[in-house]
Amino acid sequence: MINVNETKKYMVDPKKTIERAFEGAYVGSLEKMPQSPPDYLSSIWGAASILFVGILYYFSAVLAQQKNESFTLWYALSAACIAIVIFTISKLMKNHKLFKKASGGEDKKEAERAKFYDLMNYNDQPDSLSATEYSKQISPMIGKQPKELYNVAVRKIAEYLASVNNPDELSCKLLTPFGSVFNQSKKRFYMSLNDGIVSFADFDFSNPKGEITCSEEDVVSYGYFAKYPQSILPAGTGKVRPDAIILEIQDSENHLYFEFLPDDGPKIKKMFTAKKELK
């Protein structure tokens, strides 16, 4: 069934946006520190492997001693393995202390988080806000913060809001005006397919009129415009390239056609079953 609804595509949760931005910026700041975090996993597994070999050497020495065979070499190898393990663990602990001292640990992180949240008016933010409106709050703050950590976090927020308003999705044009909301031809949309629902969200993120949704089962066909009759175009629609990709959707009341760029053909084919391709 084809429906027209309000769209939440360009809405964001300011608090979650602030949280993600701070975490990303803080992790990035640690990676740039002169003292990098030690490789705990490799060090521990490496030490455990060497310790296991040392234990095998020790048992070999015991067996050799019981058989009155030379055992000195086995004890020496076992001792060498133990020494390597002790050296590795001590070095790991030393690096851990240096990194903890340099990073300030969780206390420093939480202190920075509190300052950044206060800077961003975290507690006063609504549950939902359009990315456009939130961008108006963020734009004047870019590059003007007292710490580089905060500047990086603010830039991350700005980049995220830009990605919300300009999603990496297929864009198309509605060729068949209908209803009172989308009553003009060549209106642009972003199309997406999620969990069997096809959504066409208004391309105008600053003042979206809504979105058209339908079931994947409502997709009747797709293919080159040259394969469709010219009669699918309402009067005054204008020209459509023969190699443009057309997507046809239909329910009991509406019959709509959307135009995509020729290069979008493989993506459309990947999204919908090949049985619906018009050849």
Image: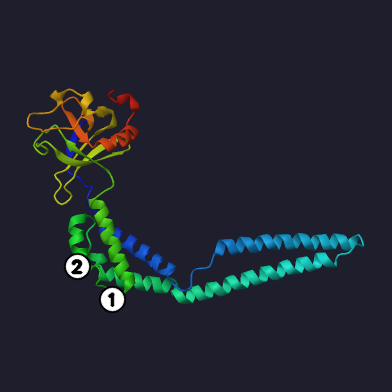
Task: State the scheme by which the image is colored.
Answer: rainbow
Q: Assign the N terminus to one quadrant of the image.
A: top left
Spot occupied by residue 164 in the image (x, y as percentages of width and height): 25, 52
10 Å neighbourhood of mark 2: few (<14), some, or many (≥20)?
A: few
Residue at image location 7% in from the left, 29% down from the top: 235
Label 1 SS: loop
- Furthest residue in direction left, as rendered: 236
**Residue 51, quarter of picture:** bottom right
210 on left or right of 149: left
Q: Quick check: 54 above or below 94?
A: above
Upstream in sequence: badge 2 or badge 1: 2
Q: Disc 1 marks which amino acid?
A: Pro
10 Å neighbourhood of mark 1: few (<14), some, or many (≥20)?
A: few
Spot occupied by residue 127 in the image (x, y as percentages of width and height): 24, 56
Q: Disc 2 marks which amino acid?
A: Pro
Whole-angstrom CA distance, mark 2 to mark 1, is 14 Å
- Furthest residue in direction right, as rendered: 68
Instruction: Tell me the number on the disc at residue 255.
Output: none
Residue at image location 19% in from the left, 64% down from the top: 137
Residue 219 showing in the rendered view: no
**Residue 121, quarter of picture:** bottom left
Q: Name the residue that disc number 1 marks.
A: 146
Spot occupied by residue 7 in the image (x, y as percentages of width and height): 20, 45
Instruction: Tell me the number on the disc at residue 140.
Output: 2
9 on left or right of 63: left
Residue at image location 68% in from the left, 69% down from the top: 84
Label 2 SS: helix
8 on left or right of 56: left
Residue 71 showing in the rendered view: yes
Q: Quick check: 136 above or below 196?
A: below
